[in-house]
Amino acid sequence: MAVVPYERIPFAGTVPSPQKENEGMITGNWRTRRPIVDSEKCVKCQTCWINCPDACVNLNDDKPINFNLKYCKGCGICAEVCPAGAITLVPELDFEE
């Protein structure tokens, strides 16, 4: 078994978002629900970012959080863990894009 130095293990088990596009992880058109953020309720606690299994939450210091919908699977984990109730899942059929 290989030993990994502790310096290389991500802090608290978080994995940074990919820095470049990964075509193998694109959702396609099968997502049925889309996360929407109410920026008035969002407290930028980053709980959604930590819990997102697809690393599709984008954090910006000067802007509200948003989601990279290319990679979002619509699982709803972000909405479940949001302590402020700022994220809701909306059916994809409600959008024209």
Image (tube, rainbow, N blue to C red):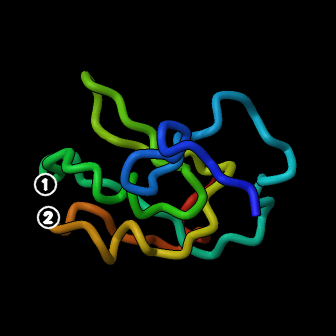
Instruction: Answer with the quarter of the image where residue 73 lies.
Output: bottom right
Query: First in sequence: mark 2 or mark 1?
Result: 1
Q: Position of residue 97 (x, y in %)?
A: 65, 50
Q: Residue at x 20, y 45 (%)?
A: 44
Instruction: Answer with the quarter of the image where residue 33 lies.
Output: bottom right
Q: Which mark is residue 41?
A: 1
Quadrant for the N terminus, please: bottom right
Q: Give the farthest residue toward the right.
A: 24
Mark 2: amino acid: Ala
Residue 44 to residue 19: above or below = below
Relative depth, front residue between 90 and 87 = 87
Q: Residue at x 39, y 52 (%)?
A: 49
- The reply to whether residue 35 is in sight is yes
Residue 92 to residue 96: above or below = below
Within 10 Å of disc 1 (Cα), the crowding (few <14, some 14-19, many 20+) is few
Q: Position of residue 66 (x, y in %)?
A: 41, 43
Which residue bears the numbered disc 2? Answer: 84
SS category of the residue bearing label 2: loop
